[in-house]
Image: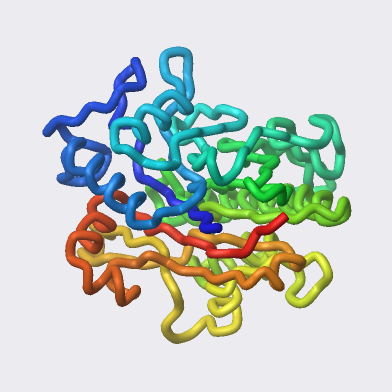
Amino acid sequence: MRLASYNIEWFSNLFDDDNNLNVDHQPSGRYEVSRADQTGAIAHVLKALDADAVMVIEAPDQSRRRDTVAALEHFADVLELRTSKAVMGFRNDTQQEIALLYDPKRLTAEHDPLGDIYDAQAPRFDGQFRIDLDIDATRDVVRFSKPPLELSVTTAEGRRLRLIGAHLKSKAPHGATTRDAIMRQSIANRRKQLAQAIWLRARIDGHLSAGDTLIVMGDLNDGPGLDEYEHLFGRSSVEIVMGDPGGAGSLYDPHAHRALQRKLGANPTTARFFIEQENRFLQALLDYIMVSPDLMSARPCWRIWHPFDDPECWTTPALREALLMASDHFPVTLDIELRG
């Protein structure tokens, strides 16, 4: 079975209020890319991936006028994708939902948010998490701007597992203009993001304690060495979510593991952003697929579909250009034997 995690930048901008595609030459959310070109590029990438299920990060909006599932299923129908069914969880207010697009012949998936919304240790993802963020002996209230998607999945062969799709909040100091304000907001944002990672880790521990097979996938917007404030807190969100290396409850992703082991030198990357102030592109490792220890015997194989670093993507011009046009993130796939 092949599972994919794919952050599709401003996917929502391709749909109208009736959840139909706007395949025209008007601008998309991508810089100097039309809606028609981005639509074609996304379809090209998804067909190349040929995944049984895709965790879509920044999925189309769910609101009073729009429907995430309807939009994704319409997209799959128009572009003739075998991943024809979609499921989402708790909606958010950012126009960037989290949803799973999947092949119903290969698996079934349903939103199954276990836990208690009022649990003090590991509340359900639409609840509130209380933690002392600034060591002032007062617990702060943390909420997810994008609640993770918690799914119960059953493969066609009868194998049951849990999937969690996550998109942790960005640390960018939006609105800050002075150096001191940028520093204060950056540190505050990192505190909040680490709190979300601790919350997510608590839910992970609950699943592993229950004996669940678990896969956590998505955009954690963080990685070792990503910014200058990481040293203030000791660990990145990625390290918190993965757990103690080698421990009974640790999750594994080879790209994260390599980056954590080698903070200097070349590391895998999954995203490419243009930094206007510096007139250059920044590459970062932001997207992950982490598996529970019991899946390490299921012959897992990870791949980042990077247009420049993956040999097949680089030597296939149409795929290379589609990856660059579709999003500022590149898909990550996991091939794994999930038998009943």
Q: Which residue is drawn at 33% across and 56% down?
A: 48
Q: Residue at x 48, y 40 (%)?
A: 101
Horizontal and vertical percent position of residue 288: 54, 61
The answer to which image quadrant residue 75 occupies is top left
The answer to which image quadrant residue 129 occupies is top right
* Observer-nearest of 86 and 331: 86
Quadrant of the snapshot with the N terminus: bottom right
Question: Seen from this angle, which residue lies furthest top?
Answer: 64
Q: Residue at x 35, y 37 (%)?
A: 11
Question: What colouring method underlies this structural image?
Answer: rainbow
Compared with 133, 300 (above or below) is below
* Observer-nearest of 131 and 241: 241
Compared with 278, 136 (above or below) is above
* Observer-nearest of 63 and 213: 213
The answer to which image quadrant residue 268 occupies is bottom left
* Observer-nearest of 157 and 192: 157
Task: Decide if residue 134 is in sight here.
Answer: no
Q: Which residue is drawn at 71% across and 34% down?
A: 112
Q: Is 47 on the left or on the right of 195, as rendered?
A: left
Instruction: Please state the total of marks drawn on the protein image.
Output: 0
Q: Is 32 on the left or on the right of 262, as rendered?
A: left
Horizontal and vertical percent position of residue 107: 59, 43
Task: Decide if residue 315 is in sight here.
Answer: yes
Horizontal and vertical percent position of residue 263: 53, 81
Horizontal and vertical percent position of residue 145: 57, 36
Q: Is 139 on the left or on the right of 338, as rendered?
A: right
Quadrant of the snapshot with the C terminus: bottom right
